[in-house]
Amino acid sequence: MAPFLSRGPLPAGRDARVPTPFARLMQRAGSGEARPGIDLRGVVAPARLFPPLMRRPTHGLDPVLGRIGSLEVRLATRPKDIRRAQRLRYRVFYEEMSAVPSGLAALKRRDIDEYDAVCDHLLVIDHAATEAKPFRKPRPKVVGTYRLLRQDQADRHFGFYTAGEFDIAPVLEANRDLRFLELGRSCVLKPYRTKRTVELLWHGIWTYVLHHRIDAMLGCASLDGTDPDRLALPLSFLHHFARAPERWRARALPERHVAMDRLSREAVDPKAALQALPPLIKGYLRLGATFGDGAVVDRQFGTTDVFVVLPVAAIAPRYIGHFGAGAERHAA
């Protein structure tokens, strides 16, 4: 898998007994009755049923969040910014990786879903590299992206994306006074998978977290491959050495649950397990994140997904010091 990848489940992978966001859109569009029990998995939603991409408000936050050299991290504010993030995701997930695109994604060559219209999108732009299109002025290249979904937005629309694979309701209920932020759909163009790019993305997230007074982050992270036995070492390490406390521990949906404790604690070599983990998951661990109970195999994307949660209070002090308590280190 890509060294920097956190995709999250697709709507097509949801439990058929629970209406997907597409099913809710069908109801709203009057295109047919969609009730629990109807299996809409694998159905490709026509583009007209997706909420339109609108100009994104920044809620008083400067869209440009930080810079390192020629790289800039910023919030997408226009529909065309989001489309550029979708094209980057398509290039990484479908062209570089082994994901199988839906008909709509293949047609538009963009990774598209209904959540794009309600999420905020972080972009890393390289001002030293340009993208040129016929009859258009060259523009700085988008080289990285992350998708952010605040709890208030999730509650107003489709819920959290992660709920398609993990039962997160007990976590939200146990922490009902806290503000959650979902992280997902992250990717970086291959030549830019460097410390600078990752640091800039995290600087953008930290700035966003402080501005919106977020208390905890959650999401899915992916390991490459769909055979849990081949991933026994990293999965067992996360289960035995980085399992979330009960209050924060989401479990894989029963019908999709894959056991993570495939090896005993004594059989796990932590050093070897860390080497086998994707860099993104190692980064989450360094920050202070913990992981859920059970993994989920996503055959469409060729990955095995785990639940990750990171309360802001658990972030290692050295990282807060590194970025600055006010996110001033790489401030624009």
Image (cartoon, helix red, strand yellow):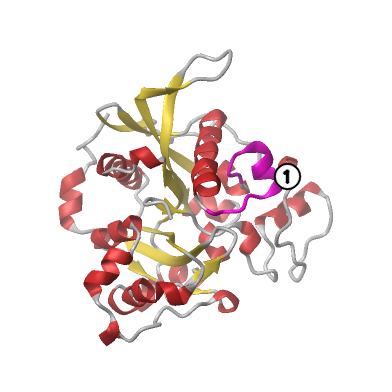
Q: Quadrant of residue 35 in the image?
A: bottom right
Is residue 101 positioned above or below 237 on the image? above
> In x, y percent, where is residue 57?
49, 34
Asked if residue 221 lies left or right of residue 104, the reply is left
Quarter residue 130 falls in: top left
Residue in the picture at 61% in, 44% down: 112
The reply to whether residue 160 is in sight is no
Query: How crowded is the residue under tag 1: few (<14 C-alpha within 10 Å), some, or many (20+)?
Result: some
The image quadrant where one finds the C terminus is top left
| 249 within the magenta span | no
* Nearer the observer, 5 or 79: 5
Which one is in front, 202 or 313? 202
Q: Is residue 329 above or below residue 224?
A: above
Q: Position of residue 119 (x, y in %)?
A: 51, 45
Residue 102 shown in magenta: yes
Quarter of the figure with the N terminus: bottom left
Please name the residue that numbered disc 1 is placed on.
49
Q: Which residue is drawn at 71% across and 41% down?
A: 47
**Residue shown at 50%/72% (left/top)?**
227
- Numbered label tally: 1
- Judging from the image, what secondary structure is the residue with disc 1 in? helix
Up-down relation of residue 264 to residue 294 (above or below): below
Principal SS element in the magenta part? loop
Query: Looking at this view, is 210 or 286 the one in front?
Result: 286
Residue 92 visible in rendering: yes
Q: What stretch is highlighted in magenta?
A: 98-112
Amino acid type, residue under disc 1 in the picture: Leu
Position in image of residue 131 (x %, y %): 47, 23
Q: Which residue is drawn at 40% across and 82% down?
A: 262
Q: Where is residue 13 in the image (x, y as percent from the top left)?
A: 62, 63
